[in-house]
Image (cartoon, rainbow, N blue to C red):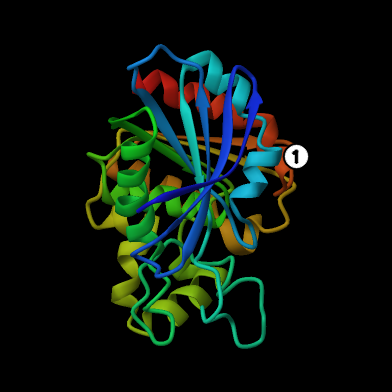
Amino acid sequence: MSLETISTVRSHGGTQGVYQHASSETGTPMTFSVFVPDHLPGTRLPVLWYLSGLTCTQANVTEKGEFRQACSERGIVLVAPDTSPRGDGVPDDAEGAYDFGLGAGFYVDATEAPFAANYRMFSYVADELPALIAAEFPVDPQRQSITGHSMGGHGALILALSRPDQFKSVSAFSPIVAPSEVPWGQKALTGYLGTDCDTWRRYDAVALVEDGARVPAILIDQGTADQFLAEQLQPERLVAACDAAGIPVELRMQAGYDHSYYFISTFLADHVRWHADRLM
């Protein structure tokens, strides 16, 4: 789990770094970013995980997210992993599509050949990377929260619902809430897990809630001008499932905003503060 520093830079009263390590889960080098606010020596800070969406790497939110000032104000470390394994020999979509394969790991542990050997993003984000972060950075592993965008919003929801003792709060931007029911998710889950739909349920936020998973509350921001809203995202499915389960959901429909980082950067500081209130 040795760590290589790719870059560090001073920003908003803290250090923004990009790092790489050899992952035992994915069998590949994995790159991630970490922002650490200035803090007293010996202090261990709460951590917010940010999971990115289709076609993205850790660089998108690191460069466009506008989260650092809020993280420094509230003393929050922000960690942004990559979205999938990469490198020579890592299988990709046969036709080079953007919504499967490289850049589209969907935060699952694949079981189908040829993806099972490398595409283990659930275990990577849930177990391997948190252990590395706790060993190498001044974070408190007892105070972790998680958020994400689109495919990463899906990842944040399923990780929080699956590991409620690990992640103290969860939010999302434009999440894919019911991948079993929409084209992006059906393609990914079939390719990574096979055609038995019962095996998909552990990676579907709506199904997890229906099957008894619980979290204290969920915050979702969704743009009304998002071109993927009706076909791929459908947040009303999660609201209905959570209402039936008694889970408070705040769905903020943001008028005129789309699916881009112009939208995310507008509200990400709000999410940092929302999580900070639940991590202190």
Q: How many marks?
A: 1
Front one among 231 and 204: 204
Q: Quadrant of residue 11?
A: top right
Answer left or right for 16 relative to 155.
right
Other-residue count near label 1 (Cα within 10 Å), few / some / many at <14 / 14–19 / ≥20: few
Tell me which residue sits at (39%, 61%) in the image. 23
170 up-or-down from 156: above or below: above
Answer left or right for 48 relative to 252.
left
What amino acid does circle 1 point to? Tyr
Q: If the image is split into quadrants, where does the C terminus sit? A: top left
Q: Which residue is mark 1?
A: 262
Where's residue 159, x and y in %? 35, 50
Tell me which residue sits at (67%, 30%) in the image. 66
As helix, strand or loop, the secondary structure at mark 1 comes to helix
Tell me which residue sits at (71%, 50%) in the image. 226
194 up-or-down from 74: above or below: below
Where's residue 20, x and y in %? 50, 52
Where's residue 238, x and y in %? 43, 50
201 up-or-down from 219: above or below: below
Tell me which residue sits at (58%, 55%) in the image. 53
